[in-house]
Image: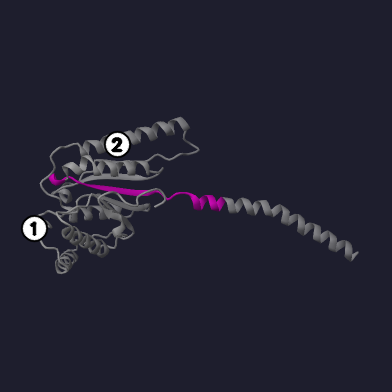
Amino acid sequence: MKRCSLKALSVIILGSMMLLSPLQQNTAGFWKKGQDKKQTRMIAVFVDMSGSTDVARRTVYRRAFDKIYQNLQQGDRIIVGPVTGRSYLDFKPAVDAEIPRKSLWVDRLKFKHDLDRTKRRIRADVEELLAPKHGAPRAEIINSLNIADKIFSNEKRQKILIILSEMIQDSKEYNFKGTKITDAYVTDIIRDRRNQNLLPNLATVKVYVAGARASNPKKYRSIERFWDRYFAAAGADFSLHRYGHSLLGFGKGI
């Protein structure tokens, strides 16, 4: 009798394990799919519109935008806006669009139509922004970062800031062209901005720079060091590996 009971119990346990096994596999597969799902992103692209970037807007910046277009994903939001001497006062995005998502509730043909229309509109608006042959007299890059702070505040998506610029600040307050950018000079600017409550909060914002240039290698390195320290003070996720003449390291899965 005991032997029969043990056999019956063994059969029940074995059967339960066999029934549970596919369920466990399906559950594991479900979580794996959830983990593989790409994170949506909030991408802000700031375009230096100063006169010295006239050529770059037709070459370097367009190549950077080609890379951005290729890497846009469903659910991403992209904002593109100009950097001028008045950006902080009257910033107006040339592009503010969200890439459509596929859904069980959206017809496949409608999704494709909406996706194509969104992409065409983004490209057309960017081309209009880059089109002027003569740029603005100044580039107020430092204050434009305070606009980025506002754009990214309360944003739940992954935050990415792409700056297409020579990175040569040119304003009445700070002018990199006619100033020797020493460590003391950088420290003074960061301290002044912090004291005036003007240091932006770029925590968790991943920063890329394309179009950087200067009159000579020494000037280039001093400007590069400035931005390295300034982004660090603002709490940004920044690396000199993402600072250069072209858009480096930007792609899917970032």
Residue 57 placement: quadrant: top left
Give the spatial CA distance, label 2 vs label 1. 36 Å
User: In the picture, residue 204 is in which quadrant?
Assistant: bottom left
Which amino acid type is marked by label 2? Answer: Arg
Image point (23%, 64%), residue name: 229
Dot 2: what SS?
helix
- Give percent across and percent down for residue 90: 16, 46
Frontmost of labels 2 and 1 is: 1
Task: Give the residue furthest to the right.
Answer: 1
Confirm or deny contact between disc 2 and disc 1 (CB under 8 A): no
Q: Amino acid at mark 1?
A: Gly
Classify residue 178 as left or right of residue 247: left
Please give the residue where the numbered disc 2 appears in the rendered image.
123
Q: Nearer the viewer, residue 186 or 16?
A: 186
**Dot 2 surroundings within 10 Å: few (below 14), some, or many (20 or more)?**
some
Q: Is residue 82 magenta?
A: no
- Residue 170 shown left or right of residue 35 in the figure: left
Circle 1 packing at 10 Å, graded few (<14), some (14-19), many (20+), is few
- Magenta span has 37? yes
The stretch in magenta equals 30-52
Q: Which percent across, then down, holds residue 34?
A: 51, 51
* Colouring convention used in this rendered image of the protein: one colour
Q: Secondary structure at mark 1?
A: loop
Task: Please tell me the numbered disc located at residue 178.
Answer: 1
Judge whether 208 appears above or below 72 on screen.
Answer: below
Image disc number at residue 231:
none
Where 9 falls versus 85 (above or below)?
A: below
Q: x and y percent of residue 249 in the render?
A: 34, 52
- Name the residue: 15% across, 37% down: 133
Which of the pair 193/47 is nearer the observer? 47
Question: Height in image: 22 above or below 230?
Answer: above
